[in-house]
Image (cartoon, helix red, strand yellow):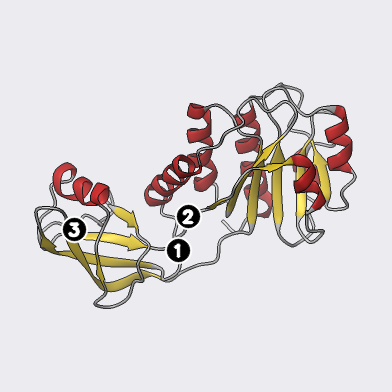
Amino acid sequence: MTDLSAPGGKVRLFVEQPLGTGARVTPSAAQAHYLLHVMRARVGDHVGLFNGRDGEWLANIAEVTRRGCVLVCERQTQAQTQDDDLWLVFAPIKKTPADYLAQKATELGVSVLQPVITRRTIVQRVNGERLRANAIEAAEQSGRLSVPEIREPLELARLVRDWSKERHLLFCDEGSAPPMPDVLAKAPAGPWAVLTGPEGGFEEEERTLIRALSATVAASLGKRILRADTAALAALAIWQAQCGKG
């Protein structure tokens, strides 16, 4: 019998089904293939399961069939915790950097990934399923108990129009703005979002529109010109270091 959830060899799977003592869970075909043919798991082996609602559970492989397997929950190993209420609002970028961004933003604890279409956005179509798949994989590997919500893209004007004044918007401004660590040292409590632009940056009219929001807190990431994905992850890391729950 192998404990695939043991430290150093931990296999964690995100599932949609409810979890609880004795709950029977049927993993997806891809998950079953991974368990049985990649990890070479057998009946009696253990894995970790989480669904974003019921904490993490130790489950055993109770049945193996030609098409998959059945997992049975034994005991809860972690109670569900509340994530930081932190969104990443970002202009879509090319496929490979977007995969990386979804993975690392998940590791950095974002609760929502919200694509926003700006005038200089090159990528107009967003593959939400691909973003979610990358977010799930990152959550499984990083120890998170939840997966970020992936939202449909919005035009910048609509995003600004519908923005709640209750959520602070940390605007990564390429213009004149105080350094982000200094800004966040005085950060007010409450929910936050980080806003980053496309490869070519925001146009001046867009910057004016964003800054006009009462919720906007403009900050600089320094003098260097950063790639869009680098800027987003740097901002998230700074926010977590100064405002996150860890």
Label 3 crowd (10 A; few <14 / some 14-19 / many >=20): some
Residue to which mark 2 is pinned: 147
Q: How far is mark 3 from mark 2, CA to CA?
A: 24 Å
Spatial CA distance of label 1 from label 2 is 7 Å
Q: Residue at x 14, y 56 (%)?
A: 2
- 47 vs 117, nearest the viewer: 117
Q: Which mark is residue 52?
A: 1
Marks 1 and 3, how far apart in space?
Answer: 22 Å
Of badges 3 and 2, nearer the viewer stands 2
**Residue located farthest toward the bottom when viewing the structure as drawn:** 21
**Residue tagged by mark 3?**
3
Q: Nearer the viewer, residue 239 or 26?
A: 26
In the image, 165 versus 182, the foreground residue is 165
Residue 221 lies left or right of residue 107; in this view the side is right
Residue at the spot 83% in from the left edge and 34% down from the top edge: 206
Q: Position of residue 94 (x, y in %)?
A: 55, 26
Q: Residue at x 83, y 53 (%)?
A: 215
Provide the secondary structure element on which disc 2 rests.
loop
- Please state which amino acid type lies under the numbered disc 1: Gly
Q: In this rendering, does residue 176 appear at all?
A: no
Quadrant occupied by the C terminus = bottom right
Q: Are marks 1 and 2 in contact (CB under 8 Å)?
A: yes
How packed mark 1 is, by other alpha carbons closer than 10 Å (few <14, some 14-19, many 20 or more), is some
